């Protein structure tokens, strides 16, 4: 072995292979830009999330209101302002600055994606690890639960829950949290199945037999020796699922059962495309959120593909 040869750890090799993937690097760059846009953008924006702007039909001057538009009908207004120096993407049908709403909407969309994936990983890894290690009756019970959750019709269930939220008068502010919890609970089954499959093969390895002989406790064997060795598959699931969850939330909001007004998400911002007048005459209102959804989902898919190839180069396409 040459003296100057650098010995790289497995983690360093994974990162080296990841950054060799140009699409994965592009996806990572897009996510960083999106995160900065959503986190820092509202701080720099001169407008608030709920501020409403009107055009006075008599004077042609813009009227800025922070009372939700109370009294606007008394002055005669046009709420859909075109693209201008003051509003780079114009204002929407409610008179709110589109660019500012995109920033706040991105916060919610990205938060939903990360929180739902965190919930599904916690529940899925816990139950999948227990099922894979113990096997037998415990494995059978958990796998039957997985099959039940796979069979649940997601969209009809969300429609029912949305009706219950409306019936019980749950505030849109708290509806966001309910949506994240419900989606996380419904999505854990896929994680549990993958983790279980990995642990079934890992528990027969020699180091697990050594841990058994050493008298290590069951929970320590599962969560210190087995689950850490499933980290590659967990990372792959997480990166792929974040994009899928954002897309699902956008679809739910588009259908009117997701994030509710007055809160913005990219999905409910794109929902205005159902109005033919806005679809034809105001692409500045519906096109930007659609493009951000597309770019974000593609970016997470690129990152997922890059992580898959980095962890197992034999799977490279």
Image (spheres, rainbow, N blue to C red):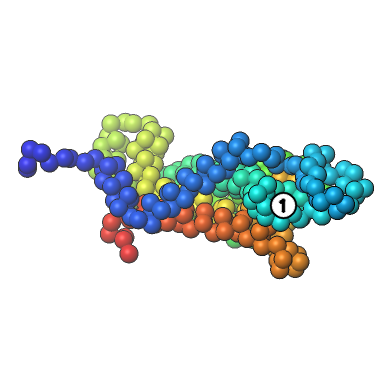
- Residue 295 in view, yes or no: yes
Residue at point 41%, 53% (across, down): 26
Residue at point 75%, 68% (across, down): 276
* Occupied quadrant, residue 115: top right
Is 65 placed left or right of 132 in the picture? right
Report crowding for label 1: few under 14, some 14 to 19, many 20 or more residues within 10 A (C-alpha). Answer: many
- The residue labelled by disc 1 is 91
Q: Nearer the viewer, residue 21 or 234?
A: 21
Is 62 placed left or right of 138 in the picture? right
Q: Is residue 24 shown above or below 214?
A: below
Is 310 placed left or right of 6 in the picture? right
Q: Nearer the viewer, residue 209 or 136?
A: 209
Residue at point 75%, 46% (across, down): 262
- Residue 117 in view, yes or no: no
Q: Is residue 150 shown above or below 5?
A: below
Locate residue 174, reporting x and y percent. Answer: 72, 40
Locate residue 40, reporting x and y percent. Answer: 56, 38
Q: Nearer the viewer, residue 84 or 123?
A: 84
Query: Regarding mark 1 in the picture, which secondary structure is present there?
Result: loop
Locate residue 312, reporting x and y percent. Answer: 30, 54
Which quadrant: the C terminus?
Answer: bottom left
Residue at point 72%, 52% (across, down): 91
Which quadrant: the N terminus?
Answer: top left
Q: Residue furthest right?
A: 74
């Amino acid at each position: 072995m040459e003296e100057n040869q650098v010995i790289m750890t497995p983690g360093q090799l994974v990162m080296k292979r990841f950054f060799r993937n140009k699409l994965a690097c592009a996806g990572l760059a897009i996510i960083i830009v999106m995160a900065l846009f959503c986190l820092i953008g509202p701080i720099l924006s001169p407008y608030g999330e709920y501020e409403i702007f009107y055009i006075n039909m008599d004077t042609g001057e813009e009227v800025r209101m922070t009372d939700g538009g109370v009294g606007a009908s008394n002055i005669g207004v046009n709420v859909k302002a075109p693209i201008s120096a003051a509003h780079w993407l114009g204002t929407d049908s409610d008179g709110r600055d589109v660019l500012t709403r995109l920033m706040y909407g991105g916060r919610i969309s990205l938060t939903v994606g990360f929180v739902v994936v965190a919930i599904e990983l916690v529940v899925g890894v816990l139950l999948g690890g227990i099922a894979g290690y113990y096997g037998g009756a415990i494995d059978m019970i958990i796998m039957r639960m997985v099959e039940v959750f796979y069979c649940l019709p997601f969209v009809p269930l969300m429609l029912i829950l949305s009706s219950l939220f409306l019936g019980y008068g749950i505030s849109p502010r708290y509806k966001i949290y309910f949506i994240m919890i419900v989606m996380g609970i419904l999505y854990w089954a896929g994680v549990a199945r993958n983790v279980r499959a990995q642990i079934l093969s890992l528990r027969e390895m020699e180091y697990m037999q050594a841990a058994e002989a050493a008298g290590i406790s069951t929970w320590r064997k599962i969560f210190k020796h087995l689950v850490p060795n499933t980290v590659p598959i967990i990372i792959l699931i997480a990166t792929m699922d974040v994009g899928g969850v954002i897309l699902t939330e956008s679809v739910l909001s588009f259908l009117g059962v997701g994030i509710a007004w007055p809160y913005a998400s990219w999905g409910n911002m794109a929902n205005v495309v159902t109005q033919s007048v806005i679809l034809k005459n105001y692409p500045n209102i519906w096109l930007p959120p659609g493009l951000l959804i597309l770019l974000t989902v593609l970016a997470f898919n690129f990152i997922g593909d890059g992580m898959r190839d980095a962890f197992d180069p034999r799977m490279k396409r």
